[in-house]
Amino acid sequence: MAQQGVPERGARLGRAFGPDGARRTVGGAVLVLADGEPDGTGRQSPLTAAAARAVARQLARAGRADGLVAHVVGYRCRGWNGAAAHPVEDAAWAVEETVRRYGDVPVCLAGAGMGGRAALLAAGHPAVTSVLALAPWMPGEDKRAPAPDPVKQLAGRRVLMVHGTNDERAEPEFSYRFAERAKKANRDVCRFEVHSDGHRMYQHRAEVLALATDFVIGSVFERGFSRPVEDALAAPPPLGLRMPLASGFGASLRRS
């Protein structure tokens, strides 16, 4: 079967949420990588792009005082497409473009599903200081897969993974196996489990967004984390990689 070609359109950064670089200094950036499909060279789904924009807006609002800018990365196509790994290339381009626009600022890659996997694999750029992966799709951890995804690119980055235990789209155990390997290469890796929730973690959306916000602001601006995140980072496997996300997380969260 002939391999499908990728449409001749480039990756792009969506509109900036947060400070206008012309009027206020940008102190850090978060690049949001949407979910997608295992295969497909058609255009990115508007529904997944819209979900990513909602996350970008929330993060930008939370980091406005610190000068956080958020962009959603526009993929060339909707699929991962095997060894081509198009979203990883798109994420790497987006980091370069962010540095070109804003200079030497810390960058967090924040992805969901397929975008979570892309964020983890594109983290080797020197500007990337942290990675947030929500329900990451990690098929390379299947024991039948030819080779697992690399983890060396995560050295020196803070990494948070969050996964619903009832996810039927992205196997939770695969993200645990990846986190377990990553923890051996980098102690600053933790993973939270959202019990009884599915791929999009709608049942505990408020808690997941609060956790994501705590991590992104804390890692980009060196502000420290909430106690549960600090505990998860410090705990050895499996405790720090199967940390339960408490109901109501973030309801009374206060930063010093």
Image (cartoon, grey):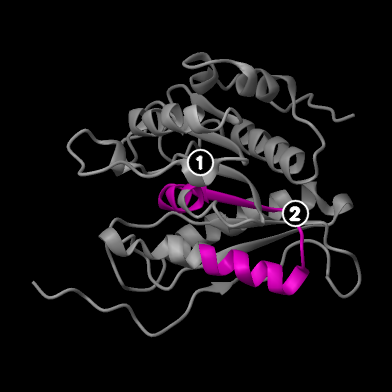
Q: Is residue 76 magenta?
A: no
Q: How many marks?
A: 2
Q: Is the magenta stretch mostly helix, strand or loop?
A: helix
- Is 217 on the left or on the right of 90, as rendered? right
Amino acid type for the residue under numbered disc 1:
Leu
Identify the residue at the far bottom of this view: 8
Q: Bounds of the magenta span?
A: 92-120
The N terminus is located in which quarter? bottom left
Residue 56, image x and y in percent?
65, 55
Question: Mark 1 = which residue?
Answer: 134
Mark 1 and mark 2: span between their CA atoms?
A: 18 Å
Question: Mark 2 = which residue?
Answer: 60
Residue 142, image x and y in percent?
25, 36
The C terminus is located in which quarter? top right
* Closer to the camera in the image, 240 or 67: 240
- Is 215 on the left or on the right of 145, as rendered? right
Q: How crowded is mark 1: few (under 14 residues within 10 Å), some or many (20 or more)?
A: many
Amino acid type for the residue under numbered disc 2:
Ala
Residue 31 sits above or below residue 181 on the image: below
Residue 238, image x and y in percent?
46, 16
For the question of whether residue 248 can be seen, the reply is no
Q: Is mark 2 on a helix, strand or loop?
A: helix
